[in-house]
Image: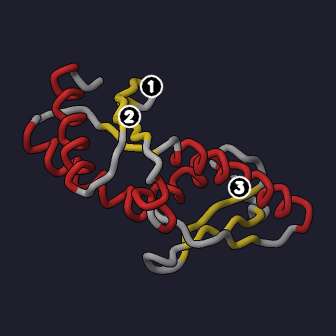
Amino acid sequence: MVTEEQKQGITELLQSILQTMGIEARVSPEDNLNGTEFNIYTPDSRLLIGQRGANLAALQTLVHSVAYRKFPGIERFSIDIDDYRKQREYRLREIAKRASEQVKKSGRSVRLEAMNPYERRIVHAYLSNEYGIDTTSVGNEPNRKIIISPKQKGEI
């Protein structure tokens, strides 16, 4: 877990960045099973999240870069805005579940929408123990997609 001193430093960094951007927000560090998450609550969430989470990803990269220099050896942490990532993860799992059911019924592969690496990892992990299907990422960034297909006979 991130120490209290590190939480304070990262919270202040985030608040400084947001203030410089002219965004009124509250930053709340929360410990969970995946480590520490800094959730930003703001009426300007759509602006901060950006299209498909692009601005959120950029903000996290910036804050990680500064935090890892300021606190060498700091544990991994994440940034979320108004629980966007939690909601997106839930939606991705629902999409993956429906697609895997469709593959099992039809015996045909299903291609999902383009996703960033974080989102693809969620889908691959969610379907990794699903019997009778296989997942593969295809294409080039930023248009890389997941194909969910039936396992070939003889595959384990």
Secondary structure under the numbered disc 1 in the rendered image? strand
> Hey, what amino acid is under mark 3?
Ala
Callouts 1 and 2 close, C-beta under 8 Å = yes
Quick check: 24 left or right of 144? left
Instruction: Name the front one of labels 3 and 2.
Output: 2
Q: In the rendered structure, find residue 96 and report the number of the disc placed on it.
A: 3
Q: In the rendered structure, find residue 37 and report the number of the disc placed on it.
A: 2
Q: Nearer the viewer, residue 96 or 14?
A: 14
Quick check: 73 left or right of 88? left
Image coordinates of residue 114 in percent, x first then y, are: 57, 72
Instruction: Name the front one of labels 1 and 3.
Output: 1
Query: Gap between marks 1 and 3, in whole Å?
Result: 24 Å
Secondary structure under the numbered disc 3 in the rendered image? helix
Quick check: 29 left or right of 146? left
Q: Earlier in the sequence, mark 1 or mark 3?
A: 1
Q: Residue at x 47, y 48 (%)?
A: 43
Image coordinates of residue 107 in percent, x first then y, are: 86, 68
Query: Gap between marks 1 and 2, in whole Å?
Result: 7 Å
Callouts 3 and 2 close, C-beta under 8 Å = no
Q: Residue at x 21, y 21 (%)?
A: 3
Q: Residue at x 51, y 47 (%)?
A: 85
Query: Gap between marks 3 and 2, in whole Å?
Result: 25 Å
Secondary structure under the numbered disc 2 in the rendered image? strand
Q: Is residue 71 above or below residue 150?
A: above
Q: Earlier in the sequence, mark 3 or mark 2?
A: 2
Image coordinates of residue 37 in percent, x first then y, are: 38, 34
> Hey, what amino acid is under mark 2?
Glu
Q: Earlier in the sequence, mark 1 or mark 2?
A: 1
Residue tagged 1: 32
The colour scheme is secondary structure
> Hey, what amino acid is under mark 1?
Asn
